[in-house]
Amino acid sequence: MIRVVLFLIVTGLLALGVAWIADRPGDVVITWQGLRIETSLMVLGAAVLAAMAVLALLFSLLRAIVTSPLTLKRHLRHRRGVRAYDAISSGLIAVGAGDIAAARKHAAAVNRLAPHEPLALHLSAQSAQLAGDREAADRAFRAMASRTDTKTLGLHGLFVEARRRNDLPSARAYAEEAVRSAPALGWASRAVLEFRSAAGDWAGALALLERHMAATLDKAIYRRHRAVLLTARAHALEDSDRDSAKTFALEATKLAPDLVPAAALSARLLAETGQLRKAARVIDKAWRANPHPELALAYSELRSGDSARDRLKRIEALAKKVPGHIESALAVARAALNAQEFAKARAAIAPYLQAPTRRIAELMAELERAEKNDEGRAREWLARALHAAPDPIWTADGHVSDRWLPASPASGRLDAFEWRVPLSALSGAPVIEPEPQAVVSAVAPVEIAATPQTGGEPVPPATAGGAPAQNPVGPQQAKSEPKPTPIIPLLHAPDDPGPEVVDESDAPVESDGGWRKLLG
């Protein structure tokens, strides 16, 4: 709209000027080299304008003739650029679709039309990777890394190729160079962080986290990563510089109160300096968020001179803060067993005996030995532990560890370890219901001593069908107890009364050889 108004204004001014000159006619006389030219002002003006138009036309024609080679070159370059752009687009689409032949065809066309274009190098590298030609891909990425505009892209490709051939030193060098060139690159910062963590360079990893990653990471992830690195550094300094280790561990607990290794280490170091209340608060906060056996152990050992009963009271108070959790039950049962409070130990793990885990079964075996010196029951529970459901353990990327590690040994990923049941243990879990004939056939070879009342006839053993069983060990009659739901096939030892009720009219059996023959 503004341009239209300006055009109308200029046109009006020109019309006014022409009209003004027409209203004031005059003569123009030119004398030059003996020639005398007389004409009117309007004719002279028209002649000047015509001459200017002719000169402009001649200048344009001459300029076109002179610049025609350059114009033709530009036209051909534009045409090649359009063809190259089409080839690059088609090639990248072919790479995404997995069409190796089309990708290589378009890559060859691009290399012929525009070999030095950044996207041409990228397409060449992508098509080589798709075809499995690692050497060609490496050459393309090196060419990209040598240019300023594609340096980071080339370094990323070289990093990926180095990781594929398991050349970790080269991969780390490429990632370090990428971080120096462009600190905001997320992949490079993460890779360098993982490499420094895998090498145990916790100070360097913390410096990288603060300098390059604090602004790009989510706040919660940043706090968690810093807490993990501080915990790792505290563990590394635990034997050499305990004051620094305590400082790092306490800062880690502030950043991530539920991080079990940080809380356990902080509590131990605080207890050494007599700060028992602060240590108890650290464990209490972590226990409420994430009950863990390492926390229970650290809490029970806060006072080194306490008796086993004092530790049991402390663990019972801790367990009440997370009632109904299996770790609370295991902590109480373990403390009660150490304090020889066997009834409390049995009561703590009683709700989990229907489907015990391995730790429950092993604890029950210890309890049978400690309380009753019943080796038969203990062996039964140990056999049950072999096939029981697995317990949680520190695991990351398929790697299982008895202790927490700050980074995965398999992938180098920071904060990868989780306290959970490993998938490999779940996939290989046996099942479940035994066949009745299998139990009978397993028990059948055991010899049973004859009773005086039956005239030398053996008393039949307990079977899965519920027939009465006799205790072959001594004169004591077996006590009845509810039979739990079977989890794995269990065979009663010959000196085990089993879950069946003994007929009180039967006399006790002499134990002269059943158990010994089974052992033989």
Image (cartoon, rainbow, N blue to C red):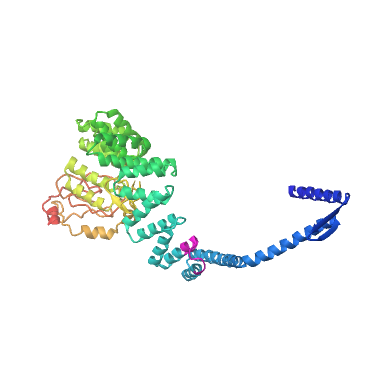
At 85% from the left and 50% from the top, the residue drawn is: 21
- Residue closer to the observer: 276 or 21: 21
Q: Quadrant of residue 262?
A: top left
**119 within the magenta span:** yes
Q: Position of residue 26 (x, y in %)?
A: 87, 52
As drawn, 339 above or below 154: above
- Residue closer to the observer: 89 or 517: 89
Residue at the extreme front of the image, as rendered: 34
- Judge whether residue 378 can be spotted in this image: yes
- Look at the image and tell me in which quarter the C terminus lies: bottom left
- Residue closer to the observer: 334 or 397: 397
- Residue closer to the observer: 151 or 186: 151
Q: Position of residue 286 (x, y in %)?
A: 34, 36
Left/right placement of residue 318 relative to residue 379 reads right
At 15% from the left and 51% from the top, the residue drawn is: 453
Q: Quadrant of residue 480?
A: top left
- Judge whether residue 41 can be spotted in this image: no
**442 within the magenta span:** no
Left/right placement of residue 455 relative to residue 297 reads left
Left/right placement of residue 385 relative to residue 28 reads left
| Magenta residues, start to end | 112-123
